[in-house]
Structure formats: structure tokens, C-alpha cells
Amino acid sequence: MASTITLNGTAGQIVNTLGNGVGQTYGVVVDSNTSSNGIIFASSFTTTGLYINGAASGLNSATTVYFQALSTFTVTNFTMLGGGATTKVAAAIYHQRHLLAAE
């Protein structure tokens, strides 16, 4: 059975799933974190679905997700939901991290 991890905190969150040396496999990863510090994925993982919920209740600005450089993230289905009339995506590299932001 595939698992689901839901990240819905109000403070920045760091997810490190490397425990077994190859990362973790999830059925679905849902990011509804409402902190301006967002989510940091600090190690490799595989998921059939990554859902970034930029319209999460209490989120009044862009949602931010960081992916650690030199890690591998395998995502089969990627969905972003914006909180405004339109969804915007920006990608950049900052301090060894790849940044994906939606507003």
C-alpha cells in the first residue's frame, strides 16, 4: 500500500527521508504548509504525486519548496494549485538548492 505524507505546518519544515541510503517512496506528497519559510526536501525521494497547494487556508503569499542539490527527486505527477487568479512558476538556484516557487 502506498503512503501519503501531508505537510501542513505553520512553520518551515525540513523533510529528510534518507534513512535507508536511497530515500523513501511515497504514494503522494501534499504540501499545504502556510509558512513563508516553506518546505525543504533535504534528501532524495520518489512519489507518484507531488501536490503543491498554494491555495491552502491561511497562505496569503507565495508558497516555496526547496529541493536539495545532489539529491534525486522522482515525481510521476506534479500538480500546483495557485492561490490567486493565475498560477506562476519560477525556478532558480540558490546556495546549492534548487528552488521552485508558486504563487
Image (cartoon, grey):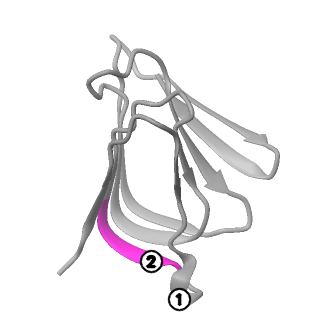
| Residue 54, x across and y down, in percent | 37, 29
Side of 17 where 71 appears, left or right: right
Q: Residue at x 54, y 67 (%)?
A: 16
Is 3 situated above or below 13? below
Residue sticking out furthest to the front: 11
**Element type at marker 1?**
helix
Kindly report the distance in space between the C-alpha atoms of the residues bearing marks 2 and 1: 8 Å
Q: 93 or 6: which is nearer to us? A: 6
Q: 97 or 7: which is nearer to us? A: 7
Side of 32 where 69 appears, left or right: right
Q: Residue at x 41, y 22 (%)?
A: 87
Q: Residue at x 47, y 31 (%)?
A: 35
| Residue 8, x across and y down, in percent | 33, 42
Residue sticking out furthest to the bottom: 20
Quarter-of-image position of residue 1? bottom left
| Residue 69, x across and y down, in percent | 73, 59
Q: Is the C-beta separation of discs 2 and 1 under 8 Å?
A: yes
Q: 13 or 40: which is nearer to us? A: 13
Q: Indicate the amino acid at tag 2.
A: Gln
Residue ID for mark 1: 20
Q: Is residue 13 magenta?
A: no
Q: Indicate the amino acid at tag 1.
A: Asn
Residue ID for mark 2: 24
Q: Residue at x 34, y 19 (%)?
A: 83
Side of 70 where 65 appears, left or right: left
Please provide the residue range marked out in magenta.
Answer: 23-28
Is 83 situated above or below 79? above
Is 87 situated above or below 70? above
